[in-house]
């Protein structure tokens, strides 16, 4: 479904290999994908990046508040 529509409304671990989290894409800000593509995964190499952790925390807050992120594609 994602490959065709470029949209995903489910758990990220269902479409990202070795992603071991229960984060629902409905609560992820759009910049997550952009930043993840270009980050170089420095956090896995001992770097100090905590961008993913901050986005995860924000997604949990949005989920608890029942606020879904809606993206308008132009």
Image (spheres, helix red, strand yellow):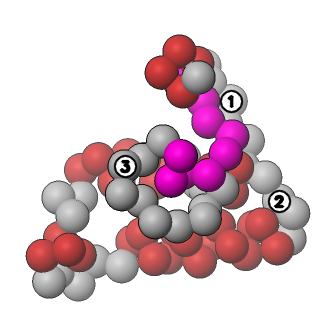
Q: Verify whether residue 13 appears in magenta.
A: yes
- Name the side, left or right, on which 20 lies relative to 28: left
Upstream in the sequence, badge 1 or badge 3? 3
Q: Residues within 10 Å of mark 3 (few under 14, many from 20)?
A: few
Between label 1 and label 3, give the one nearer the viewer: 3
User: Label 1, on which residue?
Assistant: 72
**Quadrant location of the N terminus in the rendered image:** top right
Helix, strand or loop at disc 2? loop
The mark nearer the N terminus, 1 or 2, is 2
CA separation in Å, label 1 and label 2: 16 Å
Classify 10 Å Cα crowding around label 2: few (below 14), some (14-19), many (20 and above): few
Residue identifier under label 2: 67
Q: Is residue 16 magenta?
A: no
**Callout 3: SS:** loop
Separation of residues labelled 2 and 3 (CA atoms):
26 Å
Q: Which residue is mark 3?
A: 17
């Amino acid at each position: 479904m994602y490959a065709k529509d470029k949209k995903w409304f489910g758990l990220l671990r269902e479409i990202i290999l070795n992603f071991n989290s229960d984060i629902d894409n409905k609560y992820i800000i759009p910049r997550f994908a952009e930043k993840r593509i270009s980050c170089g995964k420095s956090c896995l190499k001992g770097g100090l990046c905590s961008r993913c952790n901050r986005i995860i925390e924000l997604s949990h807050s949005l989920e608890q508040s029942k606020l879904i992120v809606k993206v308008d594609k132009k």
